[in-house]
Structures are given as C-alpha cells and as structure tokens.
Amino acid sequence: MQREDDASARIARWVASLRADAMPPSVRARARGCLIDTVGVALAGSATAAARHARALVDEAAPDGPCTALGASRRYDACGAAFANGTAAHAQDFDDNCYAGFVHGSAVIVPALLAVGERQGATGADAVSAYVAGAECEYAVGAATRSRLYERGWWTTGVLGPIGASMAAAWLLKLDEARTRAALGLAVASAGGMKACFGSDAKPLGAGHAARAGVAGALLAAHGASGPDRALEGDNGLAALFNEGILDDDRIGVLGRQWYLEQPGVDVKRIPVCLSSHAAADAVAELVAEHGVAAQDIEEIVCDVPPIVLANLKYEVPGSPREAQFSMPFAIAVTLLHGAVQLRHLCAEVLADPALLTLMARVRQYSGERWRDARLRERAPEGAAVRVRLRDGRTLERFRAVARGGASDALSDTELGGKFRDCADPVLGASRAAALLVNLQAMDGRTPLRTLLRGAAGALPA
C-alpha cells in the first residue's frame, strides 16, 4: 500500500519539484567538478579492455542514436551510451567516491545524465541540476543504509547506482511525482551487485549496467510503465532484502535541507587505485619526503587499517593490473619507486619489476584494536596508521584519517585540471582535450550539452 510519508514517496516528491534555483551555488560548483572529473576518467577508461567489451555488446544490440560514447566514434541510443560510458568511467577505478553509502556515485550518475541530456537537448546547466538531483537521492539512501549494505558484501555502486541514475534522468525528462516514483521503483527492482566483482571486468561493467538500469527505468516510466511503489522500504524491498531491514528514514527526510554533496562530500581520487589504499600511500609519501628516506632504506612498512580496507585490498602479490588496483603493497611500493601511482604504472611490465616485488614484500597490513572505536571508523573510514621501520633502526609513524583529494582535503582546481588532462590527452590529443576542459569548466550555463561534448567523441588511433 502506498503511503505519502514513506522514503520512496519523499524522494519522488523532492525530485519532481526540485528547481535549479533551490540548489546552493556551492553545491552546483561541487556538482560541476564531479562532472568534469568523471568525463576525464571515462575518457581514460574508454581505451581499456572492459570499455571495449561494453561497446562491443552495445554495437551488437543498440541502434544508432544521438548520444556520445566518450572517446569513441559511434553514437548510441541513451541506454547504450549510458552502459558504454558507465563502464568506461569506472574502468580505471579512478572515479570519485562518497562515504554516504560507500558508493562510487558519479561513475553511474554522470553517464546516465549525459545520455538522457543529449537525447532531450538539455543545456549544461540542466546537466548540473540533474547531477545534484541524482547524487543527493543516491547518497541519502546510502546514508540511510548506515553502511551495513557495504559491510554485508554488497557492492553499493551496483545496488545504489540505479537510484542516482534514474533520479537524474527523471529530472531531465521532467517526470511528475507519480512517474518519478515509478522510475525509482523500476530502477531499484533491477539493482544488484556483489563485491566478488573486485579485481575483474565485472566491476566496471557493473557500473555500466547500473547507469543503463537507471536510464531504462526513467524512460520506461516516461512511457507509462509501473514500478513497485515501495521499492526501498517494502516487505521485499531494498532494505529488507539487502540491508537487514535497516533504512534510516531521517537521512532521506533531510533532502533539500542538508546537502550530501557538502557533507560528507565527495572524495576525488588522486591516484587510480582503490581508495582504501590512498591514506596509507599518502602517509608513507609524507614520511619519506620529510625524513629524506630512500626506498632501499626501508626494512618494513606496517599499516594498521579499518577492517573494510583489509576486505577491499585482498591482493598481496597482484597478478594483473586489475588486481594491482586492490593491493596495498602495490600502491605503497609504486609510490616509493615513482612518487605516485599513475595510469601508466598499471601494466604487466611494472608488476614484473624486481624492485617493485622486493618492496611489496616489505609491506603488510592488519586491523588493530583502535578500529573497534565506531567514532574513529566514522572519522577515518579508510584511514591508516602507518609505521615505517628503517634499516638504521629508526621507526617513523604517521596517522592519516583521509586521503588527499578527500572532501576534507580536496584537490585544487589546478590539480583537478591536471588530472583531467592526464586522462584525456592520450585519448583526444592535447589540443582537443584542452578545448573540452574549457567547455566543461563553463558547463553551468545555457550552452547545449551536445555542443559542450562535441570534442569528447572519436578516439585517436591506437
């Protein structure tokens, strides 16, 4: 039975009535930054095998359409473009993260809104507004799960991503409250994902599936299809089946009064590996820089991390670039040898480097008693206490609650621009990438989205 005060009703009502002028300028600025970052990492990801697999599937099944596949020459229908770009956006694990649900939000939301936005002839400002609508809804539901969803082994990007994608799409389609609720129900009914995907192509492909599911749900609702009214809170809904019945309705009730894009905010990755390794890698980099330590001076590095970091970073000796992205020893060893992990380090040649293998063997991680403190885990969800033991007998220690690029230690506009160029230049060429960045930086205006993205299609020859 439908109730007017349940979580699904609140979300649908908020999205259907949301106006651009109700969004604080600071929130729109954060949204624009997430859009730019996601387009950049999707361009880099477009050259990966996972993205090629996604496009190959779409080539077989999807008709031509008006929507850009970032870094590729063919244009697709909205669902096909969302799947291709969602896969590309997460293919390098270089996309952002939000701790309201432990979810990769932008990699799913941005491909969905780009596809529907181009289909609808939306402006850049419309795209920014749609991002806010989708992100706030997804992160509200993520916060309402109290992180239990992630701790239970579900991959939250696959489970929650269709929510953000469908609500961004619903806003662009200007669906009324009833159709928006149907879109939400259809998207949630198709959601799913397990952390068994980590280290395989299933992970980025899952982001693509989530983006497509959100777009499909919104478009089906626009055509009159019905979805479950209480997909979040019903007896067989998301909370009951995925999350032990837990759904903190207060976290959803604050929509429009508190903004998840500001608190807890979005964490933008500085390096292209799982965020669980970033704080430890940053701490090691700071220690060796401050004390003038060389890699050969190090006897051992011990990282005391939250249990969730141990669960995510399960590859002590990674056998592939994909596994390397979920390896604490890899992240720290590359940091010591090369200064920072870069996309070019995710290759078989680097993994076979004897110096890297030697250093990785000196890194270990465990989860100590300190992490039994729930307040510490909330303050430092993927933090690290690092101890570096040197051959001369000295021991250096550093605690880092969050990584560089985290919402409380954000990258500068210059750093964000540099990351975009590092991602886009090899795919588009330096001049086209620079022009695209200028377009995206001015996105929050009346220029058609299709015009803004004109330089983002058509990869250079390999």
Image (cartoon, helix red, strand yellow):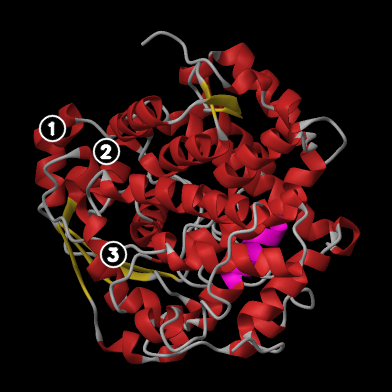
1 or 3: mark nearer the eye: 3
Q: Which label's residue is closer to the chain start, 1 or 2?
A: 2
Q: Residues within 10 Å of mark 1 (few under 14, many from 20)?
A: few
Report helix, strand or loop for mark 2: helix
Q: Position of residue 411 (x, y in %)?
A: 60, 49
Query: Residue at left 56%, top 27%?
Result: 421
Q: Position of residue 52 (x, y in %)?
A: 34, 27
Q: Residues within 10 Å of mark 3 (few under 14, many from 20)?
A: some
In the rendered structure, does residue 254 fall within the stretch colored magenta? Answer: no
Residue 400, quarter of the rendered image: bottom left
Residue 20 as seen in the image, left or right of residue 307: right
Residue nearer the viewer, 395 or 118: 118
**Label disc, if present, on residue 337 of the rendered structure:** 2
Residue furthest top in the image: 461
* Magenta stretch in the rendered image: 132-139
Look at label 1 and name its amino acid: Asp
The answer to whether the residues at label 2 and label 3 have Cβ atoms under 8 Å apart is no
**Distance in Å between CA atoms under marks 1 and 3:** 32 Å
Relative vertical location of residue 156 with respect to residue 217 in this rendering, above or below: below
Q: Which residue is mark 3?
A: 194
The answer to whether the residues at label 1 and label 2 have Cβ atoms under 8 Å apart is yes
Report helix, strand or loop for mark 3: loop
Q: Which label's residue is closer to the chain start, 2 or 3?
A: 3
Q: Position of residue 319 (x, y in %)?
A: 11, 42
Q: Which residue is mark 1?
A: 353
Residue furthest front in the image: 224
Look at label 3 and name its amino acid: Met
Report helix, strand or loop for mark 1: loop
**Distance in Å between CA atoms under marks 1 and 2:** 11 Å
